[in-house]
Amino acid sequence: MTAPEFSTPPPEPSRRLRSFLMAIAPFTGITIFFLSWELYVRISGVRPLTLPLPSDVLRHVIENPEFYWRNGLVTFQEAFWGFWLAFIAAMVVATVMAHSRFMERATMPVIVLIQSTPIAVLVPVFLLWFGFSPWPKILTAALFAWIPFVANALTGLRSIDAETHELLRSVNASRWEVYWRLRIPHSLPYLFSAARICIGLALVGAVVGEFFNSQEGLGNAARVAQSRLLVDQLWGSVFVLAFIGVASVIVLTAAERRLLRWHSSQSVI
Amino acid sequence: MVAINEPAICFDSVSKWFRRKGQITHALADVSLDIAPGEFVSLIGPSGCGKSTMLRLVGGLIPVDRGEVRINGESAGEARRRKHYSFVPQHPALLPWRTVKENVALLGQLNKRAGAAGIAADAQLALLHDIGLGPFVDSFPSELSGGMQQRVSIARAFALGAPVMLLDEPFSALDEITRADMKYLLLDLWSRTGSTAVFVTHSIPEAVALSDRVVVLGNRPGHIRTIVDVDLERPRQEDIEDSEQFHALVSDVRSALKAGFDSV
């Protein structure tokens, strides 16, 4: 006896090809980008001072691992601590604001003030306060990253479902329980999308801080390279900074996958 | 101490006003109603008649403006602090980051000081199996249909097992076929508990099929028009909806509601 025809789904011949294409898709864009760059420089004969070959830059980075590791680590640490400082400060402020309309109204103008001030102009102030320590860079990184964090944290903590809140109230759940069991998990997707932006912003903050006054870090390496026309080192710093940013986003995405398994942004298709 | 014939829920000339953007709405006017322990009472009426307001007054979720609401002799707020309510909201209101079984355990884990932890974990699992959610205990709510999500919401209420059940149009977002199933599932679970149930609905057959009494409300301001006694035998199965008695009761409630509309 053969099974009736409708008992098996029709074959999907292109399935394998499709999943293969999906797997390599992220790399194709990058590859095309660098290949076009390489080809353009080789064909047009543009001076290396204007635009070096990406392969030359890469070779320079690989040949000077100690230099880039040391400076990269400095910049990464400044951005890292700035990022977490921004996160903690934003959670504290957003928590207070989410629990009191008065505090929200009182705090909002300060946030707008910080948001509208070009933060880079504060770096000299931080230098006055903290001198040659990592703190001016960490604070700059934190201020750059703070605004998206506080805005998204406030939205996340506030926008809980009214009926779910009422359900928790029906058993007289405390404010702390509502906060911990409902507001915080609800705001996780908002915090992750803020974190994506803030990784880049914290790196910008750290580099800007280093431009002003620093003896180390990739921002400093780039500044020195520019003044001495060390094109490879200038672009090498750019490459390593980009690498730090991308690697951080990849780590963040992995954490998001684990923590937000329940969220619609993680669903397949 | 609670006297034997003390009502489980007592509305004593309760009035309620809402102030919103300078406008004052008279939501309930001088409502008195006694609900006996273990009784299933439905509140039905046009939109804005105050039936949801009554439910929230019972639950101590909003304060009474005049009069008094007592739950087994104590205030609604006190009953809430002691976790005397199993609440089934209109939408499932599940926590999307918790699996089905974690959602069912939620109410027991909150407000631990009240000492009402609900039924044990294995009894919760048995309950989920009973109502056909066995294969889904480890699923997230987003993986379930609307009907299954509402099932979880009902299971969550029974897992707490409080003496008073508050149901706020729990089936209104479901399709007709799912609704029919849910009604008798709810009745079956409720009949095992002996809890007092207050059920808000828009559906006349639903109110009749479930209740011991149907309280028909009128609006502007909300008041009790009439109370229809439903003397259908328990336990009830879906076939009671074919009986003549059922149809007579449905038409009683309908004409009481109509009288309310005509007087507006």
Image: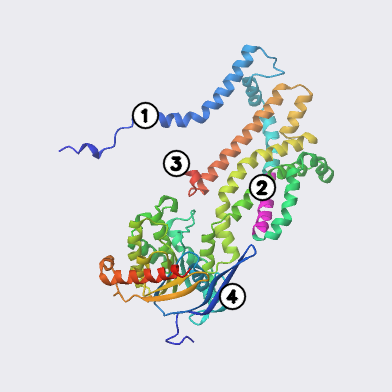
Q: Residues within 10 Å of mark 2 (few under 14, many from 20)?
A: some
Q: Name the residue beneath numbered marker 2.
A: A84
The foreground one among B39 and A252 is B39
Q: CA distance from mark 3 to mark 2?
A: 30 Å
Q: What's drawn in magenta, residue-wise? A: A81-98
Tags 1 and 4 both on a single chain: no
The answer to whether dots 4 and 2 both sit on one chain is no
* CA gap, disc 1 and disc 2: 45 Å
State the image quarter where residue A51 is shown.
top right
Please tell me which of labels 1 and 2 falls first in the chain: 1
What residue is rendered at 61% in x and 20% in y? A37
User: Is B69 situated left or right of B243 in this image?
Assistant: right
Q: Provide the secondary structure element on which disc 1 rests.
A: loop
Do the CB atoms of the residues marked 4 and 2 lie less than 8 Å apart?
Answer: no
Q: Is residue A146 left or right of residue B138?
A: right
Depth check: A58 or B165 in front?
Answer: B165
Q: Nearer the viewer, mark 4 or mark 2?
A: 4
Is B245 on the left or on the right of A1, as rendered? Answer: right
Q: Residues within 10 Å of mark 1 (few under 14, many from 20)?
A: few
Query: Which chain is indicated by disc 1?
Result: A
- For label 2, the SS is helix
Q: From the image, tell me which residue sits under label 4.
A: B65
Chain ID, mark 4: B
Which residue is tagged 1?
A14
Q: Identify which amino acid the numbered label 4 is placed on.
A: Asp
Q: Quadrant of the C terminus of chain A?
A: top left
Q: Are marks 4 and 3 in contact (CB under 8 Å)?
A: no
Q: Quick one: A260 or B239, which is closer to the camera?
A: B239
Q: CA distance from mark 4 to mark 3?
A: 51 Å
* Lateral position of residue A5 relative to residue B39, left or right: left
